[in-house]
Amino acid sequence: MANVGRGGRPGDGFVGAPETVRARLRALRAGLWAVAVVLAARQAAAVFSAPRADRLTDLETWVGPNGVLHVKGSLYESTRFTGTPFGGLVLKPLTRAAEQTLGWGWTFGTLLLVVALGLVAARALPPPVSRRTSLLAAPVAVSLLMLSLPVRNALHLGQTGIIPVLLVLLGCFAVRGERACGVLIGLAAALQPTVLLFGPLLWFTGRRRAAVSTGTAFAALTALAWAVMPRDSNRYWVHHLAGAGLGENAGDAANQSLHGALLRLGLTGPPETGLFLALGAAVAVVGLRRAVRCARDGQLLLAVAVTGCVAVAVSPATWRHQALWVLLALVGRVGRKASDRYVWPVAVVLVMTLPARMMLPNMPVLDPLRDNVVLIAALAAATVVPFLSRTSAHYRTPVPADRAARVPTRWKRIPLLPSGRVLTRPNLLLELLLIRVGYSAYQQVRLAATGGTISGGRAAAEHHGGQVAAVEGFLRLDIEHWVNHAAVRTPFLRDFFDFYYESFHFGVPLAVLGVLYVRRPADFRWARSGLALATLLALVGFWLYPLAPPRLMPGLGIIDTVHGVQDFSKPDYGTLTALTNQYAAMPSLHFGWSLWCGVVVAVLAPRWWMKALGLLHPLLTFSAIVATGNHWVLDAVGGAAVVATGFALTRLVQGPRVRTAVEPVGSGAEPPVGAVGRTSG
């Protein structure tokens, strides 16, 4: 399989490029490698900064002073070792290494393996590959691997899950000769038996000598381990059926195989075993057929990834550090339209780099999805994702998005983004993914601003609250106490503002985005970008200036109308206590998001009364945040500032908003009546 169909040189499409372009490309490549180095250093620092008892825990239980590899009896007397007998045979010599030296060597050795894996994966991209892609693919691949949960988990635990993946890729793309290819894959299978699934892939793609070598190498290494450790081999291969049942509870959420998913659904015993075998066989047949088609199509890396995803699903236990195959599946191209092309790679990257709780809300009804998110991605890649064939007309040239006419940039060093002024509706799934992950990141940053605890920044937040109160007093803006007590004395106002504060913060922005997505796609992009940038700027404010709201300022006399009277020795923030940082008051995104809604509605609504209702929303929100004691007046000023800056940055990088339905560039269509001369401003 090595290098089949990789005709042409990577640089052919880049010959004659201006020297300035080449220089920028070299600078970009250097910057990406710098990012990869920083990420590698960060991962190493995370390992060595952890308490000794919490780092390299699996490695310690294997080869440490009291590890299972020191035991004279069976490796499997305890549940701490789950590898193959051959894996134990390979690791046994490490028991003579000093503990500290072994930890450093294992960690940096693992990082080098990750770099090698990224280099091989980048080299294996299906042709044609431009010079730009060939130069940038390697640092991007290494960075994604460093960020991925399997690599981070392997580094933290001291696991070996990266080695089988690297051996398979070396066998398929780096070595010459079918026999060498088969030996490397057989070695990988001796460490992780489900790698034997690559044997059928080799056989049905015409690499039969490699397939035979794979089986021979696997059998020879397994026999060697059996001769040296017959008792352990019998227990692993016969008593536990290739390791099934060893180690942690197979129903744990960390096991991302079909077996683990069925156990989490409550199935046990023979029914679960039968269903697992039936589903596993179906996934193996469908997945391997798809992998063979990909290989014959010249997409060899995708074929390897699909086969690896089959192995993830059908293994009795696939722990996090063994799920790296799923990340390789992002090389497949999905979608005929340009707007759909990024959905699959973005989804894979998010699944493989972020915790499941960031992907899906913490709701009981979503537990089956959240607990199996890696398995779902593996099953999708193996069985249903419609990867494009290289013979498809849309493989290299997807249907482009309609765009408005380009406008000149005002600053030479700040060019407009090439995606600016797009008229086509964006992909809904991609938007939902980004909104969900963006909101999860927003929650995490708000909490991290006070050291990861609700009360971590209380002293600083109350000090900053005193500063804001003094500034408002100087400016004669200190109306919080009067407005709050006026609302408390009027039950109707108190109930209304409490309801408005709790109910409209998320509902109105989502409704505005939904209407724009359906009715005004181009304006949706403009409005969404402004909102995202405003929220990002607000996070910077939360981080740099933690601020206590008036209701959490001792001695101020503000009544918390939403959560009740506060005990300032131990404030209770209601149901939000365990969810978010209550000292993130500056700027007020309650007001900022409402102002964003008002501006968007006022600009885009076709009727005057709609515009008036839109502008009424930020006014009522301002009244609610002050009346309930949740924000200072200056917090609203800060919210307005980040919204204004967000819209300004959107105009800077995208150009002016498209004001009417215009003729898409290159469409050849006639512009609608009244559109000429009014396309932008």
Image: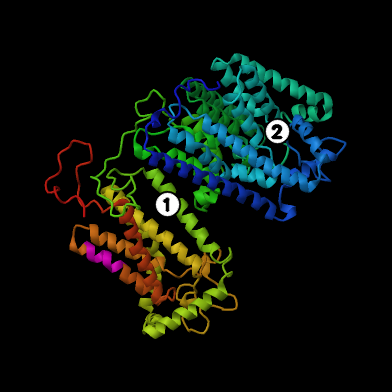
Q: Circle 2 — which element?
A: loop
What residue is at 71 percent from the left and 29 percent from the top? 242
Q: Nearer the viewer, residue 361 or 326?
A: 326
Residue extending furthest right?
A: 72
Q: Nearer the viewer, residue 8 or 269?
A: 8
**Above-or-below relation of 230 to 49:** above
Q: Name the amino acid, label 2.
A: Ala
Image: magenta residue range: 610-617
Position of 55 compared to 600: left or right? Answer: right
Q: Quadrant of the C terminus?
A: bottom left
Q: Circle 1 — which element?
A: helix
Percent x, y of residue 294: 48, 24
Badge 2 is on which residue?
A: 244
Q: Main secondary structure of the magenta part?
A: helix
Magenta stretch contains residue 21: no
Q: Nearer the viewer, residue 389 or 95?
A: 95
Q: Is there CB contact under 8 Å for labels 2 and 1? A: no
Number of other residues with Cα within 10 Å of mark 2, as a class: few under 14, some 14 to 19, many 20 or more = some
Circle nearer the viewer, 2 or 1: 1
What residue is at 76 percent from the left and 26 percent from the top? 238
Q: Is residue 519 visible?
A: yes
Q: Quadrant of the N terminus?
A: top right
Question: Which dot marks residue 435?
Answer: 1
Residue extending furthest front?
A: 19
Number of other residues with Cα within 10 Å of mark 1, as a class: few under 14, some 14 to 19, many 20 or more = some
Percent x, y of residue 82: 73, 37
**Above-or-below relation of 12 to 477:** above
Magenta stretch contains residue 615: yes
Q: Name the amino acid, label 1.
A: Ile
Q: Is residue 267 visible?
A: no
Position of 235 compared to 272: left or right? Answer: right
